[in-house]
Image (cartoon, rainbow, N blue to C red):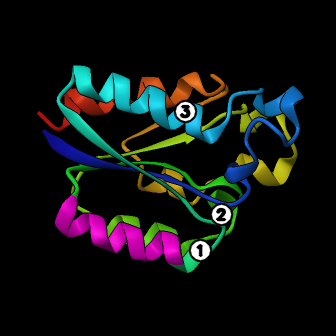
């Protein structure tokens, strides 16, 4: 099985409890279980992680350089602010897919720009938590 990292940024630990009208009622644990189930279909081992700390996300991206064939990332608000995450992803040679639960283009103007999108090989936004399953399926086709 090929390992992929599924990285989640700030506030995603509150999934299912925070603004369910935007993000839904499924928890991050539900999303992780579903990613792992879909990953098995494609012989992917999904290493699912969440942090509210930018530096920890950067460290995990660096770790992925040695340990992962691809990265799925929902950087949360760091999408719009973090050059550090962009730089770390740019040093990663495998495929990167960016996921957003909400359609960031229908939200506040500051959410319309993502530094991560400049590096991502694909972006999935506005499909709810199903976006993670879509990203996992796509990753299965990229890391054969």
Q: Disc number at residue 31? A: 3
Q: Secondary structure at mark 1?
A: helix
The CA span between labels 1 and 3 is 21 Å
Give the CA separation, mark 2 to mark 3: 20 Å
User: Which tag is nearer the camera, tag 1 or tag 3?
Assistant: 3
Q: Is residue 17 visible?
A: yes
Labels 2 & 1 near each other (Cβ < 8 A): yes
Q: Dot 1 corresponds to which residue?
A: 54
Q: Which mark is residue 78?
A: 2
Numbered badge on residue 46 = none
Question: Where residue 96 appears, x then y in whole percent?
Answer: 36, 48
Quarter placement of the N terminus: top left
Q: Where 47 sits versus 122, above or below?
A: below
Q: Secondary structure at mark 3?
A: helix
Residue at 76% x, 48% y: name it: 14
134 versus 19 height, above or below:
above
- Magenta residues? 56-67
Image quadrant of residue 36? top left
Q: Which residue is nearer to you in this view: 12 or 109?
A: 12
Binning the other alpha carbons within 10 Å of mark 2 as few (below 14), some (14 to 19) or many (20 upward) gives many
Earlier in the chain: of badge 2 and badge 3, it is 3
């Amino acid at each position: 099985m090929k390992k992929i990292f599924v990285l989640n940024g700030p506030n995603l630990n509150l999934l299912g409890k925070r603004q369910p009208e935007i993000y839904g009622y499924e928890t991050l644990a539900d999303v992780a279980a579903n990613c792992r189930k879909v990953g098995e279909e494609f012989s992917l081992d999904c290493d699912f992680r969440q942090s509210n700390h930018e530096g920890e996300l950067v460290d995990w991206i660096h770790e992925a350089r040695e340990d992962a064939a691809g990265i799925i990332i929902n950087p949360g608000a760091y999408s719009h602010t973090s050059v550090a995450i962009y730089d770390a992803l740019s040093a990663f040679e495998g495929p990167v897919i960016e996921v957003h639960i909400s359609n960031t283009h229908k939200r506040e103007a500051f959410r319309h720009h993502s530094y991560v999108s400049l590096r991502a090989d694909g972006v999935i936004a506005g499909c709810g938590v199903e976006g993670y399953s879509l990203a996992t399926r796509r990753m299965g086709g990229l890391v054969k």
